[in-house]
Amino acid sequence: MKRAENVATHMWNSEDFDLDAYLEFLHFEGDRAPTLETLRALQRAHVLTVRWDTIDGFLYQKVRLDLATLQDKLMRRGRGGYCYEHVTLFAAALERLGFRFTAVSGRVQLGADKPRPATHAMLLVEVDGARWLADVGFGASPLEPIALVDGAKSEAGPWPYLLRWQKITYGSSGWAVHQLRDRANPQEGWEIRQVFTENPQYPVDFAVGNHFVASNDRSPFVIRPFVQRMRTDRYDTLDALAWTTERAGAAATKETVKPHDVPELLDDVFGIRTDPDEADLLVRRLTALSEQD
């Protein structure tokens, strides 16, 4: 079978990727064959283990996507990253394992009344003639790949996700990922989380999108820090100083935290470590941000 054009050998620089260290970090001990079972196990382990934050964009307006930096930051230093970082790491792992896949970009919707930039990174993975959406970098990510079929659902994790083929923008059709409109009240129905087409993306395309998200003064990830952690029974977010915890079938709990409490909260709740200098800078920037309100 002919390999997809954008999965040429080493396109995702997997020759520079320490697969053994990655799998050890995930506590993954399963089979390494490029099967659906392996893909499912990897996505679940990645989403539950690799942390998610936008701290670098907020503090430094710079995020690097080279594998050496990502492996050091996400696997060794105990920090998190956002979709471009997660997907670049995951793509290198899949490439080393022999999976065939296409990278794509999505537009996060969540109630927006006009198209947002296509700055969400995902992978479409082909296994045994079927294709699967691997969305490991959203933060509140599905714990399993979703079949690229109209009406496919993911029931893994605390909340379901639905994939539909539909009109997505200005008469153009494509794929839409739906999530519950109100996680505490499933009867409220679905809303579109992100939309995407199957137009292939390459590392250079992710570099362009990443530059905007990490450095543009209109990017929400530059304006304030956002941190997420998905577990099998709860979902925590820290949006600047607003800490929210959600559990399936229960109302969310919300709390406003003080800037100087954030480094400890990141460690205790989100599993994210900041070194003393970075923690100090984060507290100072959050203090300045709170004084603007």
Image: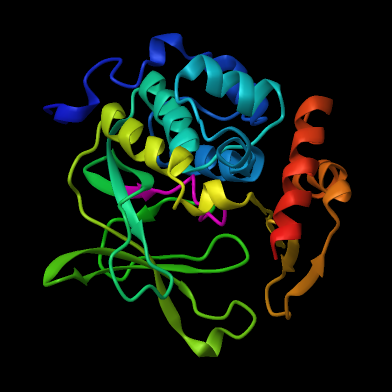
Residue 133: x percent and y percent?
Answer: 35, 50
In the foreground, 153 or 210: 210
Q: Quadrant of residue 167?
A: bottom left
> Residue extending furthest top?
15
Q: Is residue 287 left or right of residue 128?
A: right
Residue placed at 28% from the left, 27% from the top? Answer: 204
Q: Quadrant of the N terminus?
A: top left
Residue 291: x percent and y percent?
Answer: 76, 58
Residue 5: x percent and y percent?
Answer: 14, 28
Q: How many marks?
A: 0
Asked if one can make out residue 271 in the rendered structure from this viewpoint, the answer is no
Q: Is residue 110 left or right of residue 19?
A: left
Residue placed at 84% from the left, 60% from the top? Answer: 257
> Residue extending furthest bottom?
187
Q: Main secondary structure of the magenta part?
A: loop
Q: Quadrant of residue 173?
A: bottom left
Q: Is residue 252 magenta?
A: no
Q: Quadrant of the C terminus?
A: bottom right
In the foreground, 186 or 281: 281
Asked if one can make out residue 175 in the rendered structure from this viewpoint, the answer is yes
Residue placed at 80% from the left, 43% from the top? Answer: 283
In the foreground, 54 or 36: 54
Q: Is residue 158 left or right of residue 210?
A: right
Residue 54: x percent and y percent?
Answer: 59, 43
Residue placed at 33% from the left, 49% from the top? Answer: 132
Q: Which stretch is magenta? A: 132-142
Name above or below for residue 201 compared with residue 22: below
Name above or below for residue 70 compared with residue 187: above
Q: How is the image coloured?
A: rainbow
Q: Is residue 138 magenta?
A: yes
